[in-house]
């Protein structure tokens, strides 16, 4: 007998994601895109269910103000609930490269994976790695996370601001008479090749590499969506209930969701 949407929602009403990444990595931008929100409907509650002022996530607020246990939701899509690593980086407050406090992150993930109810467990991790930062991935930050432990939940490495690598490759192109279109094509090719040989290789050589990798670009622009992240997350989820729930929850990339939901309904 196939499982109905109501049965899935009764067991686990929301898909829970932990988003990790250094300052300015593009975390909040991704959450908003995923929920098709402009940010005005953002809601935060603390571990006791008490309402928290959403301004604690604003870029100029101290990272320590935020608590990883806080649940972030958007009214535009109540099927997703997020946790932001933002409060957890150690070191100088204004140093975007200050090291990740990996132990605290793993403690949080371990605790969540021991929760008896599926609704309280963490269902996926998005680790955002900004490509406009010359020091990413670094041994103090992203690589430390992947070298620390095997994750009890799927981890997706999200390479954000990928266009920064393409811009860099464009500037490095040799002088010639190629058209702008050809130059852009060559820059994309060179950026991808450099990324594969350096960034991706470093990530894949860690002790516990991510389940999926995805590149995102120009997410600061209104027109862009993060369909690649939807597909990568969907591909990483093993549990059937969770994969059905994720398919229902994601709205901004309709392809996976509609197919799955239609199959469940019919
Ligand atoms: N160029 C470019 N900018 C981006 C992209 N994604 C996000 N940004 C911009 O990067 C800045 C930081 O994005 P946020 O989403 O606030 O980053 P964050 O990781 O939540 O930052 P903190 O909350 O301070 O840790 C914003 O100005 C975004 O508009 C992208 O793909 N390309
Ligand atoms: Mg943020």
Image (cartoon, helix red, strand yellow):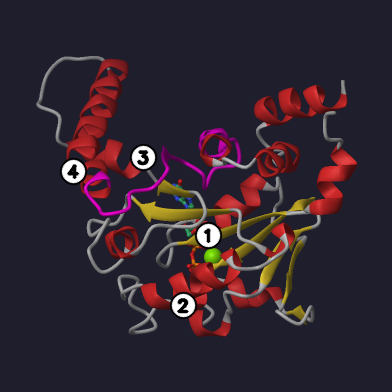
Q: Which residue is mark 4?
A: 198
- From the viewer's perspective, is residue 143 above or below residue 156? below
Residue 88's mark? Answer: 2
Q: Depth-wise, is mark 3 or mark 2 nearer the camera?
A: 2
Was residue 147 drawn as part of the magenta stretch in this picture? no
Q: Position of residue 192 (x, y in %)?
A: 26, 31
Q: Considering the numbered disc 3 on the image, is that residue within a helix, a strand or a loop?
A: helix
Judging depth in this view, the residue of 202 and 193 nearest the camera is 202
Judging depth in this view, the residue of 117 and 67 nearest the camera is 117
Q: How far apart are the alpha carbons under marks 1 and 4? A: 24 Å
Q: Position of residue 152 (x, y in %)?
A: 49, 57
Q: Specify start and end residues of the magenta stretch as a single range.
A: 204-232
Query: Is label 4 within 8 A of ligand 1 (CB to nearest ligand atom)?
Result: no
Q: Residue at x 64, y 52 (%)?
A: 32
Q: Which residue is mark 3?
A: 163
Instruction: Check whether the beta carbons of the residues at disc 1 and disc 4 lie within 8 A of each other.
Output: no
Which is nearer the N-term, disc 3 or disc 2? 2
Judging depth in this view, the residue of 248 and 252 nearest the camera is 248
Q: Depth-wise, is mark 4 or mark 3 nearer the camera?
A: 4
Q: Which residue is mark 1?
A: 19
- Whether residue 179 is visible, yes or no, is yes
Q: Quadrant of residue 240?
A: top right
- From the viewer's perspective, is residue 258 above or below residue 182? below
Q: Residue at x 43, y 54 (%)?
A: 128
Was residue 212 drawn as part of the magenta stretch in this picture? yes
């Amino acid at each position: 007998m196939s499982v109905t949407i109501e049965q899935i929602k009764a067991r686990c009403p929301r898909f829970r994601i932990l988003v990790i990444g250094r300052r300015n990595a593009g975390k909040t931008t991704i959450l908003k895109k995923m929920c098709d929100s402009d940010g005005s409907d953002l809601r935060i509650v603390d571990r006791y269910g008490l309402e928290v002022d959403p301004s604690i996530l604003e870029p100029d607020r101290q990272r320590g103000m935020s608590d990883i246990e806080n649940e972030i939701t958007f009214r535009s899509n109540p099927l997703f609930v997020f946790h932001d690593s933002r409060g957890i980086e150690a070191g100088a407050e204004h140093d975007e490269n200050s090291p990740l406090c990996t132990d605290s992150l793993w403690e949080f993930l371990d605790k969540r994976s021991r929760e008896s109810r599926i609704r309280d467990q963490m269902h996926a991790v998005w680790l955002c790695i900004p490509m406009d930062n010359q020091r990413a991935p670094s041994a103090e930050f992203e690589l430390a996370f992947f070298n620390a432990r095997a994750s009890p939940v799927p981890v997706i490495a999200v390479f954000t601001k990928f266009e920064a690598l393409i811009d860099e490759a464009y500037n490095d192109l040799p002088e010639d008479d190629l058209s702008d279109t050809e130059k852009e094509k060559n820059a994309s090719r060179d950026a991808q090749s450099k990324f594969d040989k350096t960034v991706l290789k470093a990530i894949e050589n860690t002790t516990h590499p991510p389940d999926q990798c995805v590149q995102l670009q120009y997410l600061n622009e209104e027109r862009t969506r993060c369909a690649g992240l939807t597909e990568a997350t969907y591909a990483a989820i093993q549990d059937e209930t969770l994969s059905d729930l994720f398919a229902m929850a994601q709205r901004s990339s309709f392809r996976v969701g509609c197919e799955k939901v239609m199959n469940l309904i019919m």
